[in-house]
């Protein structure tokens, strides 16, 4: 066995060991609920998977997704010790396959670009960091893979320049959303306390404040001693409301509430004149109630998703606002209409049950898990947690909720989509928003019914109308074809003979498409020694059509050249092929000159 063969075999052996090791890590991580992504632990999983894909691509010749097909073998060898692998088999295979296919497209492009740069890099032994950054930033080619491929070619990469380019990019991003903050002005020492689970309004004092500038706008951040305002967190938007002085008539709008360094920070456009007085603060209750309806609906939808699709479904993100809700979850395929309907029906059944809120604050984490509460993978929890229970739905949650599910009214899923490999997203509305949507739909149906004669069977009537329309269109097209054929006969009868060539020049009012049909009808009737020039003004738009028989083209004439030159008279341009060309323009008044300018 020659040296080169030994080296190749060693590379193959290494690749197989890397893939075998990495497939275990990836499969176990997905089983535990961690999916590949561009953030935190998800990015680690994505990099591990991509490294394995690259070894298979380069050393095993695997140009298509293959790792997902190794999952049955992994289950055979380790399924007894880890039964979760078999339970989540479909999800694991789906996620890995999608990730492989996505990265293989990137890998092929990246390797091709990198290979073009390697010969130049061999002169200095190092690849320019800017090139490595372009591969990363533009084509999604990770630096560690660039370094790996370069090492295999005895090369390195200028990481200092790469890091410099990366820093420039980060600075550009920071500058785009740059926030200038003054130092905190402390009015009173103490810790801020959230009381919003129990109170919508309270009397309180300002602990500290500071001025903030962003994108040319100036506003203020205020920390209160006690606050009923929920700060944006866990996917739920922050509360808004107002702050009113108890010693003067000042009223300041609180436009949002954010969480910063575990502090509830209230955003305002101005400050009260007397900062030391006591203030009456109150949340915008209608907005809070709408948020609470949507938040509780996410819990009911989560429970319904797990019941309809399976227990592999886990929350991967959410967004709750007064207007709608968004819920991201792990699942391996698009939901069918039937599945969406089942999920909606289950969630609405939970609403009609009017299950009361069972809230358990400061619950030991172990007890919360005994209660069946689901902890989100990757989330950090303290020794005690807040458990929210509505009927069979039990979750760890710090957000605000309705007092009983009946307050939601109704939930309606308005969209379902994929946002990443193995992650789906549903968007939904509740309460009054559902009523408004149903009103709009009902009004549209009523308008359609009125338009078609108030028939009760809209579908049958519309199908009949469409069928009749299709038949009429067919008849109209046949009629037009017949008329054009007769038109062609008349034009041939009036044609001029010039040096053995039949020349037809005509100005009409048909469309450019009909002019094309007419030209080819003329060619069919006289395939040799024919030159057709049709000028048309249809709905105010001028167009030119030129057709030449094949023998004229063979003799050196060109329809494209003719039509482009003539189109100058109608302030236009066009193109086509040597035997047929068309042009459009802007000046109908120049049509006669355009047609006559095309010589024999």
Image: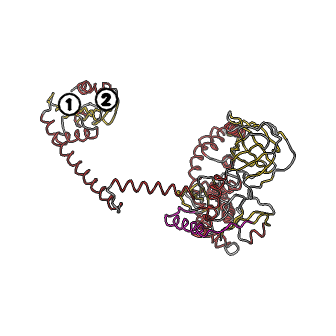
Q: Is residue 185 above or below residue 197?
A: above
Q: Which residue was labeled with disc 1? A: 505
Residue 433 horizontal/vertical position (percent)? 55, 55
Residue 70 horizontal/vertical position (percent)? 61, 66
What residue lies at 68% left-to-right and 35% top-to-bottom?
217
Residue 69 horizontal/vertical position (percent)? 58, 65
Q: Quadrant of the C terminus?
A: top left
The quarter of the picture where residue 410 lies is: bottom right
Q: Is residue 125 visible?
A: no
Mark 2, Cα crowd under 10 Å, few <14 / some 14-19 / many 20+, is some
Q: Is residue 520 above or below residue 6?
A: above
Q: Is residue 206 above or below residue 311?
A: above
Q: Which circle, 1 or 2, is nearer the viewer?
A: 1
Q: Residue furthest left?
A: 493
Horizontal arrangement in the rendering, residue 546 relative to residue 119 (left or right): left
Which element carries disc 2, helix, strand or loop? helix
The quarter of the picture where residue 553 lies is: top left
For marks 1 and 2, the one nearer the N-term is: 1
- Nearest to the observer: residue 240 or residue 98: 240
Dot 1 and dot 2 residues touching (CB under 8 Å): no
Q: Which residue was labeled with disc 2? A: 561
What residue lies at 34% left-to-right and 34% top-to-bottom?
575
Magenta range is: 332-359
What residue lies at 24% left-to-right and 52% top-to-bottom?
472
Q: How many marks?
A: 2
- Nearest to the observer: residue 197 or residue 565: 197
Q: Is residue 360 visible?
A: yes
- Nearest to the observer: residue 372 or residue 566: 372
């Amino acid at each position: 066995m020659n040296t080169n063969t030994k080296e190749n075999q060693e590379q193959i052996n290494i690749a197989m060991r890397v893939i075998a090791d990495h497939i275990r890590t990836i499969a176990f991580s997905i089983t535990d609920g961690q999916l590949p992504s561009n953030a935190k632990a998800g990015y680690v999983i994505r990099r591990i998977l991509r490294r394995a894909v690259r070894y298979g691509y380069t050393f095993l010749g695997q140009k298509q997704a293959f790792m997902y097909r190794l999952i049955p073998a992994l289950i055979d060898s380790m399924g007894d010790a880890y039964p979760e692998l078999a339970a989540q088999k479909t999800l694991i295979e789906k996620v890995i396959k999608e990730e492989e296919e996505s990265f293989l497209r990137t890998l092929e492009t990246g390797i091709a670009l990198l290979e073009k740069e390697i010969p130049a890099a061999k002169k200095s032994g190092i690849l320019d960091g800017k090139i490595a950054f372009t591969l990363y930033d533009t084509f999604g080619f990770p630096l560690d893979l660039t370094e790996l491929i370069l090492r295999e070619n005895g090369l390195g990469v200028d990481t200092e320049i790469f890091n410099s380019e990366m820093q420039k990019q980060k600075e550009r991003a920071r500058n785009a959303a740059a926030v200038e903050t003054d130092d905190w002005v402390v009015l009173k020492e103490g810790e801020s306390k959230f009381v919003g689970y129990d109170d919508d309004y309270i009397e309180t004092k300002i602990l500290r404040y500071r001025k903030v500038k962003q994108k040319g706008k100036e506003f203020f951040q205020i920390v209160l001693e006690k606050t009923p305002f929920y700060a944006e967190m866990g996917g739920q938007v922050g509360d808004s409301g107002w702050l009113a002085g108890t010693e003067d008539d000042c009223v300041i709008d609180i436009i949002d509430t954010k969480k910063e360094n575990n502090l509830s920070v209230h955003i305002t456009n101005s400050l009260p004149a007397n900062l030391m007085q006591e203030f009456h603060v109150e949340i915008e209750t209608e907005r809070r109630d709408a948020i609470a309806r949507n938040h509780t609906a996410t819990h009911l939808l989560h429970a319904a998703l797990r019941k309809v699709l399976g227990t592999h479904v886990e929350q991967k993100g959410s967004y709750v606002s007064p207007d709608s809700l968004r819920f991201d979850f792990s699942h391996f395929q698009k939901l069918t209409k039937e599945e969406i309907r089942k999920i909606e029906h289950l969630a609405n059944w939970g609403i009609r049950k009017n299950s009361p809120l069972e809230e358990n604050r400061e619950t030991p984490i172990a007890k919360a898990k005994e209660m069946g509460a689901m902890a989100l993978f990757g989330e950090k929890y303290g020794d005690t947690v807040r458990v929210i229970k509505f009927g069979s739905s039990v979750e760890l949650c710090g957000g605000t909720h309705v007092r009983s599910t009946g307050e939601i009214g109704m939930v309606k899923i308005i969209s379902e989509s994929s946002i990443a490999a193995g992650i789906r997203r549903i968007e939904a509305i509740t309460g009054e928003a559902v009523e408004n949507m149903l009103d709009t739909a009902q009004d549209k149906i009523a308008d359609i019914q009125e338009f078609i004669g108030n028939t009760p069977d809209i579908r049958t009537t519309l199908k009949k109308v469409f069928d009749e329309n299709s038949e009429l269109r067919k008849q109209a097209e046949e009629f037009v074809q017949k008329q054009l054929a007769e038109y062609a006969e008349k034009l041939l009868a009036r044609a001029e003979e010039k040096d053995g060539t039949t020349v037809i020049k005509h100005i009409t009012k048909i469309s450019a498409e009909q002019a094309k049909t007419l030209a080819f009808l003329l060619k069919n009737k006289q395939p040799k020694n024919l030159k057709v020039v049709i000028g048309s003004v249809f709905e105010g738009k001028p167009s030119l059509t030129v057709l030449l028989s094949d023998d004229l083209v063979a003799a050196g004439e060109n329809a494209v050249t003719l039509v482009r030159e003539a189109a100058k008279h109608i302030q236009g341009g066009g193109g086509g092929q040597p035997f047929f060309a068309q042009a459009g323009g802007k000046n109908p008044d120049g049509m006669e000159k355009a047609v006559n300018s095309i010589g024999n």
